[in-house]
Amino acid sequence: MSGGEAARRGSWGERLVAADLERRGFQIIARGYRSRFGEIDLVALNEQYLCFTEVKLRKSEAFAPAWAFVDRRKQEKLRVTAELFLAEHPQLQQQPRFDIAEVYAPQGTKTQNPEIVYWENAF
């Protein structure tokens, strides 16, 4: 798979998760927030939480569940990047948390009903 194809699939998965979060009352305030340390796929908030969400898209969990690919190294990159985001947005007072959204799409972007498994406070 080409890098462009992977980016397109990843963006598709992030849009699905963003729409799901919005249905659940969250506002998406950043997509693909980047720092020199890493990237946060989605930053969403509601009245109580500021969610830093890592989206993992897979065809299945036959090899391993998608959340398993968010290892300690990736978690640390997300933490440091979130700290920078918070420093840039001091007006945000919601409780921060780190979530993982698994998107299972057996036919890739052609999947009719992809499954989203959302893990709150994943790490």
Image (cartoon, helix red, strand yellow):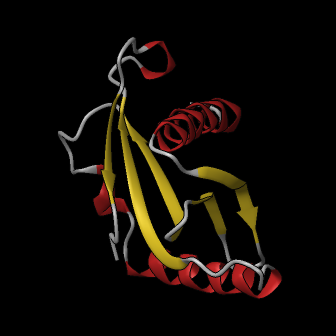
Residue closest to the eye, 3 or 116:
116
The spot of residue 26 in percent (x, y) is 55, 51
Q: Is residue 97 left or right of residue 59?
A: right
Q: Quadrant location of the C terminus?
A: bottom left
The answer to whether residue 80 is above or below residue 101 is below
The vertical placement of 90 against 105, above or below, is below
Q: Please tell me which residue is depicted at 65% across the width and 38% down the height of the picture.
A: 7
Position of the N terminus, as image quadrant, is top right
* Residue 116 or residue 56, whichever sits in front: 116
Question: Residue, x 40% and y 50% (percent of image)?
Answer: 101
- Of residues 19 and 73, the one nearer the viewer is 19
Location of residue 4 in the rendering, given as x and y in whole percent from the top left corner = 71, 33
* Lateral position of residue 5 relative to residue 25, left or right: right
Question: Image check: 61 left or right of 99?
Answer: left
Q: Is residue 32 left or right of residue 51?
A: right
Of 106 and 22, nearer the camera is 22
Q: Residue furthest right?
A: 88
Residue at (57%, 77%) from the top-left corner? 94
Q: Residue 115 appears in which quarter of the rendering?
A: top left
Position above or below: 47 against 60: below
Q: How many marks?
A: 0
Q: Position of residue 110 (x, y in %)?
A: 47, 12
